[in-house]
Image (cartoon, rainbow, N blue to C red):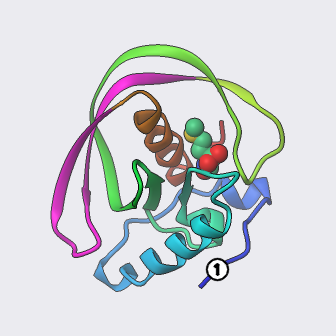
């Protein structure tokens, strides 16, 4: 189901809790909501649709990837960048890493690990920050 986007920064600054298998249906809401904002948005964290669980979605290719309890297990080559966000106005400067490895549970609650570079890595870092209540 397409959910409304949260823009209240106080709410977005609350850290999210660990997700469980019971949160698997969130994947559908995240996919539906990301698809509805496809022209303006390449990723989303569950707290952007009002659910404070560590779940993100990232458009890493033609199909979006949903990650439950994602954790960064390596990061290399910091660089400065400016980013926007559907929940915020304007573009803001931050630092991202060019190459990351992220561990997570997939939509079938299987452990998975991805090594990502460049823009794909940037999206995942942005969404991981959301899980900690960090805005750009
Ligand atoms: C390049 S990282 C920017 C990600 C951002 N998503 C919001 O959480 C968006 O604009 O889709």
**Residue 40 appears left or right of 59:** right
Give the quadrant of residue 83: top right
Residue 113 lies in magenta, yes or no? yes
Give the quadrant of residue 50: bottom right
**Residue 17 appears left or right of 112:** right
| Number of marks in the rendered image | 1
* 24 or 37: nearer the viewer: 37
Spot occupied by residue 10 in the image (x, y as percentages of width and height):
76, 56
**Splitting the image into four quadrants, where does ligand 1 fall?**
top right
Spot occupied by residue 3 in the image (x, y as percentages of width and height):
67, 78
Quadrant for the N terminus in the image: bottom right
Determine the residue positioned at 23% across, 44% down.
114
Quadrant for the C terminus in the image: top right
| Farthest-out residue, right | 89
- Highlighted range, magenta: 95-116
Q: Note whether 2 is above or below 102 in the view shown.
A: below
Determine the residue positioned at 44% across, 43% down.
124
Determine the residue positioned at 36% across, 80% down.
24
Which secondary structure is most common in the magenta stretch? strand
**Residue 34 appears left or right of 59:** right
Where is mark 1, residue-wise?
Answer: 2
Residue 134 lies in magenta, yes or no? no
* 65 or 100: nearer the viewer: 65
Task: Label 1: state its secondary structure.
Answer: loop
Determine the residue positioned at 50% across, 53% down.
131
**Residue 99 appears left or right of 26:** left
Q: Few, some or many C-alpha atoms within 10 Å of disc 1 (few <14, some 14-19, many ≥20)?
A: some
Spot occupied by residue 107 in the image (x, y as percentages of width and height):
29, 72
| Farthest-out residue, front | 62
Q: Note whether 26 is above or below 112 in the view shown.
A: below
Spot occupied by residue 80 in the image (x, y as percentages of width and height):
57, 15
């Amino acid at each position: 189901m397409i959910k409304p986007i949260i823009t209240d920064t106080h709410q977005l600054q609350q850290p999210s809790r660990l997700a469980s298998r019971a949160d698997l249906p969130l994947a559908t809401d995240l996919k539906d909501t990301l698809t509805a904002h496809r022209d303006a948005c390449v990723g989303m964290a569950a707290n952007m649709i009002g659910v404070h669980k560590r779940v993100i979605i990232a458009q890493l290719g033609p199909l979006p990837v949903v990650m439950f309890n994602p954790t960064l297990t390596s990061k290399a080559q910091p660089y400065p960048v400016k980013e926007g966000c559907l929940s915020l106005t304007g573009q803001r400067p931050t630092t991202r890493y060019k190459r990351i490895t992220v561990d997570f549970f997939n939509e079938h609650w299987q452990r998975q690990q991805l090594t990502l570079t460049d823009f794909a890595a940037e999206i995942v870092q942005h969404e991981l920050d959301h899980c900690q209540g960090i805005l750009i």
